[in-house]
Amino acid sequence: MSISLKGVMQSTVTPLKADFSPDLSTFERLLDFHVRTGATAISWPHHKGESLNLTIAERKAFAEVAVRVVAGRVPVSIHVSALAVEDSMELARHAQQIGADAIIAITPYFWSPTPDALYDYFVGLGTSTGLPLIAYNSPSYLAGVEFTGELTRRLIERLPNFIAMKEASFNSEKFLEISRVALALRPNFSMIAGVEFLAPSVPLGGAGSYSSAGAICPNLCTQLYAACAAGARARARELQFKLARLWDLFRDQYPSSLKGGMVVMGRPVGPTRPPLPTAGKERQAYIATQLGELGILETEPHGW
């Protein structure tokens, strides 16, 4: 099974009701909004989707909605990482049962496994289903545990379904290390940047990004990717600097600030589940001011 992962892909937030219970109807609207505004793939639930604050049953329910609503318009990958390895395996099997196009998994939480243990973990996931596997590298959230070029080589040689990586170290040297190995062994391998770091990553073989700001400004995100793909360096730099300011805004109290920004843009998705804070009126007002200064309020879609 093969899928194309390229361009501005969306890893969506998780809508919740005022009592913090799942809001599946708003999730349907959100998914449709992302597809209509140019997302080339959907992936859920990454950390901005509050994956660690959801039960396994809730994750299954949201995943089923994602596959049903997107309905083959773009690929849907399900993030299956959990604290317990068996829960990850269960979520992977469920993703295949409901018709997802791929699974995505980060390195194990909390522990510091050896390279061989990491290899065994991803081989276990990659052979547990017939779905394409996307790895997720984010060492800043995982006590420095990270992918290497050597681990990437071993997994590509072992797993024919290992097709992509979300490389979220925000380290160009690390991105280059993995990209050089992966693309030499599997030329159609997709190296996907975390958030919108496209100007640094596309010249190094990057296929696109899993977007955060796309929930606020999908037009700006697609314009940046188009400029990078066309080699329009000055334009790409201009747009990347604007998106860097947005990332600085949203990563403060992430993902609650992102949800607060969605309220400003007329797409409320509810609170952030504790222990994460929820963006209140004061924070939303500050975000609105910043979005106004960046011209986002005038150039991006409001409402659903």
Image: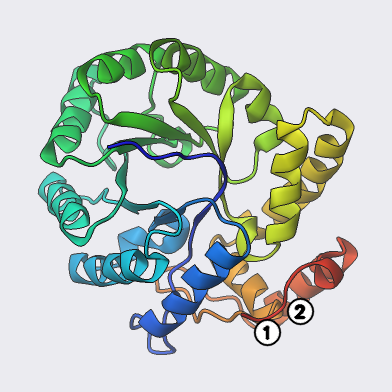
Q: Residue at x 54, y 63 (%)?
A: 35
Nearer-the-camera pick, 268 or 75 = 75
Q: In whole angstroms, how far apart are the C-alphas of marks 1 and 2?
A: 6 Å
Q: Residue at x 20, y 18 (%)?
A: 158
Question: In the picture provided, is 99 more to the left or to the right than 283?
Answer: left
Q: Is residue 19 above or below residue 141?
A: below
Instruction: Please say if 25 is above or below 141.
Output: below
Q: Is 135 or 117 nearer to us in this picture?
A: 135
Element assignment for label 1 = helix
Horizontal relation, residue 287 to residue 277: left or right: right
- What's under tag 1, amino acid-wise? Lys
Amino acid on which disc 2 is placed: Ala
- Residue 108, image quadrant: top left
Residue that badge 1 annotates: 281
| Residue 169 x %, y % | 52, 32
**Res. 285 mark:** 2
Whole-percent x and y of residue 298?
86, 71
